[in-house]
Amino acid sequence: MPELPEVETIRRGLELGLTSQTIKSVEILWYKSFPVPADLIQQIVRGATVRHLDRRAKVLIIELDNDYSMLFHLKMTGQLVLEKADGERFAGGHPTKSMRDSLPDRSTKVIFDLESGDRLYFNDFRKFGWIKLVPTAEIGYDPLVARLGPEPLSIDFTLAGFRQQLNRHKGSAIKPTILDQSTVSGVGNIYADESLHMARIHPLRLSGSLTTAESKRLFEAIKTIIALGIEHGGTSFSAYVNALGGKGDYLEHARVFRREGQACPVCGTIINKIRVAGRGTHFCPKCQLEPKV
């Protein structure tokens, strides 16, 4: 599932190609992907112009000029592919051949035709992703958005607030605590592993056991790792052109994620992989000491 840096990379890239574009028509090939009646699509979406692209955690927001917005969540296999009239293509999301092959294909669920001749495809092979149409002023009341914690790079993400969340989850392991989107929004499996390694905290440590110094290290690590992820355009598991015209290369700089059996970049110890809360979890057994029972 795309995490905050991936969605931010998509936002920045598509903003260049979509802002000020007018939507000519919408073709919904799988209704559950965009469950809005045809008459509302005609009234609200058709003829609207894209004013701005925003993001909240892992949710991409396309704001229209009529006080409505479309919320996109890519989930496990979602993609957004902007195909320009001249054949140039920008894509982001789960990397598959749909990003480069002829579209629409069997993964295509929604097609936005733009007045310019460009097309925006929402592809989702496993059909877990979704698009919602909501009044822009009511985005904060959406059930998913409403439960989100602060953005890790915003002024709302404070050490005091983070420590309160750790105390609220004091009996839970620290990794699922920081994966909880009400603790801090947008952090997923990759960046949780990376942040815990930078902070030298074992993923099975109980949240309530962290000292003041350790919680501060983790707080700073989350901000640093997310910023690095955005700087490197997120991650990519196969070659494709992302929405900024490049390949997300964070994994080439990863500290522990997907590096089991390799040497820790800090101490040289072999990186291990275990399962924590059902998620594959990478850590260094020397830098991140296992908690004592």
Image (cartoon, rainbow, N blue to C red):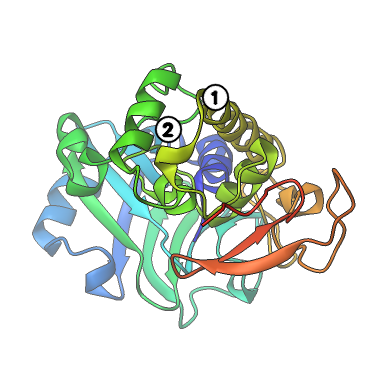
Q: Which residue is mark 2?
A: 20
Seen in the picture, residue 145 relative to 153 is either above or below; the reply is below
Q: Residue 173's x, y, as percent?
A: 44, 52
167 is higher (above) or lower (below) than 112: above
Q: Secondary structure at mark 1?
A: helix
Image mark count: 2
Check the image and name the residue furthest to the top. 155
Nearer-N-terminus badge (2/1): 2
Which quadrant of the figure has residue 161? Answer: top left
Q: Residue at x 55, y 48 (%)?
A: 192
Where residue 21 sits in the image (x, y, percent)?
42, 39
Disc 2/disc 1 C-alpha distance (Å)? 42 Å
- The 10 Å Cα crowd at callout 1, few under 14, some 14 to 19, many 20 or more, is some
For residue 82, say whether it is visible: no
Instruction: Please report the residue visible at 35 percent of the width from the left and 70 percent of the height from the top.
Output: 128
Give me the residue at 35% from left, 41% from top.
Answer: 61
In percent of width and height, residue 69 lies at: 26, 40
Q: Does the rendering let one see residue 283?
A: yes
Query: Type of residue at label 2?
Result: Ser
Q: Nearer the viewer, mark 2 or mark 1?
A: 1
> In what element is the residue under mark 2?
loop
Tag 1: amino acid = Lys
67 left or right of 209? left
Pick the front one: 152 or 244: 152
**Residue wearing tag 1:** 216
Q: Please give left or right for residue 146 compared with residue 284 in the image.
A: left
